[in-house]
Image (tube, rainbow, N blue to C red):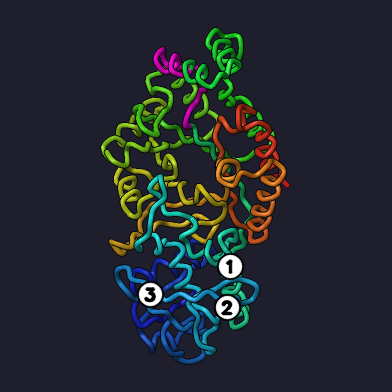
Amino acid sequence: MILVYTHQISSRVRYIFRTLFQQFMNCEVRFTTQVEEFIAYDGIKISYTKNPLGNELFFRSHSILFEKGISDQDIQVKSWNGQKAFFGQSENSALPFDVFASSFYLLSRYEEYLPHIKDRFQRFPARESLAYQNGFLRIPIIEHWLEDLVAALQAKFPQFTPEPRQFKFVNTIDVDNAFCYLEKGAIRSIGGIVRSLLKFDVSEIAQRVRVLFGKEKDPYDTFDYLLRLQKKYKFESIYFFLLADYGHNDKNIGYTSKRFQSLIKSMSDYAKVGIHPSWGSNAHPDQLLVEIKRLEHTVKREIKRSRQHFLRLDLPMTYRRIIDLGIREDYTMGYASEVGFRAGTSLPFYFYDLDMEVETKLLLRPFAVMDGTLNEYMNLPVDDAQYLVKELMDRVKKVDGVFMSLWHNETVSDNRNWQEWNQVYEFTLEEASR
């Protein structure tokens, strides 16, 4: 057990110390504001305040963990011990930067509450982030800071032995469109043929006809392939299904489709499932409850996992809405336009509501790389995409973190602009199994 002295036990202090020590290192932590109690304690103890008290490990505190509300922070990023760091501190502090304040800033997504210009999908842009602008977005920086924290503690208290982590890989699949041609209805099918005619794409028309007449498998129906690989590599998979009403940016299969419902039931027998909240549910919050109930009715179990369609995340309202509807794990924490670690970590952590100044029970599970990022945003060839996936995964393996990838059923179809991208998917699985 670690005893922490601080001059004020704020909710932010409780949150970040518990996250770093209990959540990430499985070490119990207790707080006190009583100097006498702290000095008398003969176990592992650290002080987090402005001046040291005695023979403890002292970390000089930044003011952000004792503030309320959101304000512009004076952040100067510098290099130290091979990594970037900010919120620098004086020489008598155990580390030359405030690891607790810095971690809180990244995990709480403090910068996303500050004024910023959203992208065309109403999202916080990766290029606006501190991590991107200072070159550490592709590094699980908090895990490296934890190594510095552990080293400082063990230098003072050799008996300190945090529980070791092990590298873990989590595979996630978003099902925006279960089928390319099937179950689209007459109007959408005719519209698709017209669009193909306007593009003079006779081969697409022929493929559509063959699929509709049962002569060829729908190209987006890659689910048997995905399950075969899941069985081969023995990894955890989670499928997020879009069950929206048809609309702008929600062009999925109709939720009443028997074929679609059968698919969802079948996949839920072999993998975990979650809801993919629609674009439309952002403007009409009541719609999300309808979508969750549709999925629960199909799989006959409660739905506790979610990932936002288009990764649309509006803090703190998006998370408040899903918490109110019983969601306990969300998988949206990542960027569409850039690979890397949006919150500075690969590890799961609980959402801290900055407006309410409270730690919630919503567990956020970050992902590091998405198929669309590599192909559609970065325009990488297959070989370069594989190299980047390996680079990111190696960095996560080095710190015994969690590497989560985001794919879609259509992106492994070897169809249209996704030709040969199943090779990147299989490469990811192979590297994770090493």
What residue is shown with label 2? 153
Three-letter amino acid code of the residue under disc 1: Pro
Q: Position of residue 382 (x, y in %)?
A: 69, 40
Q: State the SS at label 2.
A: helix
For the record, the magenta segment spans: 176-192
Q: Residues within 10 Å of mark 2 (few under 14, many from 20)?
A: many
Q: Earlier in the sequence, mark 3 or mark 1?
A: 3
In the rendered view, does 392 fall on the left or right side of 180? right
Residue at 39% over, 27% down: 300
Q: Quadrant of residue 205?
A: top right
Asked whether the viewer can see residue 192, the reply is yes
Q: Residue furthest bottom?
A: 54
Q: Position of residue 143 (x, y in %)?
A: 58, 64
Residue at 31% over, 51% down: 317
What residue is shown with label 3? 64
What residue is shown with label 1? 162
Three-letter amino acid code of the residue under disc 3: Ile
Q: State the SS at label 3.
A: helix
Q: CA distance from mark 3 to mark 1?
A: 27 Å
Q: Position of residue 227 (x, y in %)?
A: 61, 29
Q: CA distance from mark 2 to mark 3?
A: 23 Å
Q: State the SS at label 1.
A: loop
Q: Position of residue 241 (x, y in %)?
A: 45, 32
Q: Earlier in the sequence, mark 2 or mark 1?
A: 2
